[in-house]
Image (cartoon, grey):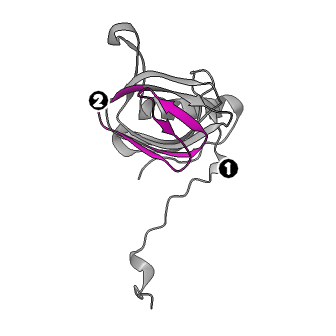
Amino acid sequence: MPHDPGPLSHCRPARIAAGAALPWIPSGLPGLSVQPLRFLADGRGFVELLRMPPGSVMPLHRHSGEAHTYQLSGWRQLCGGEIVGPGDYVYEPAGHVDWWKVVGDEILTALVMTMGAIEFLGPGGSLRGRTDADGRREAYRRYCGERGLDTVDLEDA
């Protein structure tokens, strides 16, 4: 028998971001687009859907904080040779360096929670670019503003 929690006055409403109303934003990397879902308070990180077509490559990068990825569709091969597919979960600790590519003939879609920044690396570990919650937020606002789209409140309370 379910437990009766009593009056619901102590409950707070959930923060729902209707994915169908959120745009897919090109990221600057060939083929990569993201759908922002939440920007964590104090710039701690961000949550987004990531989408890439077959043959796309996520270039060499380092995570300054941990990253959690749940694969929804498509297949990717990690730089160590492992194959990740629908239903797989990948954890990357802070400092993790990797690259990967989309394999097979299906579009890759994954739910990603990134803490800290992602730093894109060049030869000898040189820093080629960087993205974090502030950068993702600004890209979302700019994309919507340029197209006359309303932004949805995706900020942590």
**Whole-percent x and y of residue 140?**
56, 34
Residue drawn 55% across the image and 23% down it: 57
All told, the count of numbered labels is 2
Q: Mark 2 points at which residue?
A: 95
Q: Give the quadrant of residue 109.
A: top right
**Whole-percent x and y of residue 53?**
65, 30
Give the crowd class for mark 1: few <14, some 14-19, many >=20 residues within 10 Å: few
Q: Is residue 120 left or right of residue 26?
A: left
Q: Name the residue under label 1.
A: 20
- Is residue 141 visible from the viewing direction of this image? yes
Residue drawn 61% across the image and 40% down it: 74
**Whole-percent x and y of residue 108?**
61, 37
- Residue 101, disc: none
Check if residue 71 falls in the magenta segment: yes
- Mark 1 vs mark 2, foreground winner is 2
- Pick the residue in front: 74 or 82: 82
- Pick the residue in front: 13 or 53: 53
Element on which disc 1 rests? helix
Which amino acid type corresponds to the residue marked 2 in the rendered image? Answer: Gly
- Pick the residue in front: 120 or 59: 59
Residue drawn 58% across the image and 37% down it: 75
Q: Is residue 114 left or right of residue 52?
A: left
Q: In this view, does 19 lie to the left or right of 95?
A: right
Element on which disc 2 rests? loop
Check if residue 66 falls in the magenta segment: no
Residue extending furthest bottom? 1
* Alpha carbon separation for disc pair 1 and 2: 33 Å
**Whole-percent x and y of residue 5?**
40, 85
Which amino acid type corresponds to the residue marked 1 in the rendered image? Answer: Ala
Residue extending furthest front? 81
- Range shown magenta: 69-98
